[in-house]
Amino acid sequence: MRRPLIAGNWKMHKTVRETLEYIKSFRELVRDVEDREIVLAPPFTALWIAGHELAGTAVRLAAQNAHWAESGAFTGEISPLMLKECGVTYVILGHSERRHIFGETDEMIRKRLEGVIGAGLRPILCIGETLEEREAGRTLEVLGRQVQAALQGFTREDLRDLVVAYEPVWAIGTGKTATPEQAQEAQSYVRKLLADLGGKEWAQEVRILYGGSVKPENISDLMSQPDVDGALVGGASLNPETFAKIVKYA
Ligand code: PEP
């Protein structure tokens, strides 16, 4: 049985002070939620204080990226070890903004995954096609390339905590959500790819999230699909009341 996971990606939003205000209100709003996992991904500068304020709650912390090395001459990067010290459990990798704005390649994402797994953190691997790729009928091919490139060389044991987030690039921050059927088509294909790589039994256990303009109004329909096991939420996670509504979808 896959436990639903709802994660909020704050991107480059919220100072330490704003993080404290958010968490004070959010932890009360979700206090009684038990049957699903809740994850918040603040910016690096707010991780430590967020970890401190979330201690004793069921809300887990995610980072928005990580380098592959423990330390070294990598200006501007953060190591998995540093994230672990801040109380981080999950790390988002390969987000479309990392791929498309900052030029992260499949190979870089695979290396980051290696660092995250090596540190005992849980990866949330983001994949997704652009509008151009969808319109050219290449969606499944792109997903196949991204999954295979990121996961090659890992054992099933390495990937026991893997979470995949299907995030069509055309749906991120645009207000254009994929239909539940589009999400299901892509995500059942991803599960098939995972089964080819690591076996059917393992693939059935991997949670596959949908991300792209998720809101309180569309979460229930998306979650009704058999291969949608949760959501990665950007804009709508920035307000504690709105995000709590998404977390508490019926
Ligand atoms: C995201 O950043 O992963 C995301 C899905 O953003 P939004 O919900 O704003 O589309």
Image (cartoon, rainbow, N blue to C red):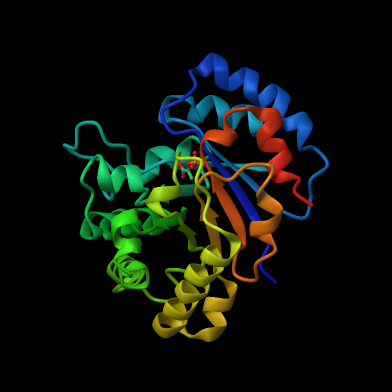
Residue 22, x across and y down, in percent: 63, 23
Residue most toward the right? 32
Out of 136 and 8, give the one closest to the viewer.
Answer: 136
Can see residue 231?
yes
Out of 240 and 180, give the one closest to the viewer.
Answer: 180
Q: Is residue 106 left or right of residue 167?
A: left
Can see residue 56?
no
Out of 161 and 190, give the one closest to the viewer.
Answer: 190
| Numbered-mark total | 0
Residue depicted at 75% across the width and 48% down the height: 249
Q: Quadrant of the N terminus?
A: bottom right
Residue 79, x across and y down, in percent: 33, 41
Residue depicted at 62% across the width and 49% down the height: 6
Q: Is residue 156 left or right of residue 236?
A: left
Residue most toward the front? 135
Residue most toward the top? 17
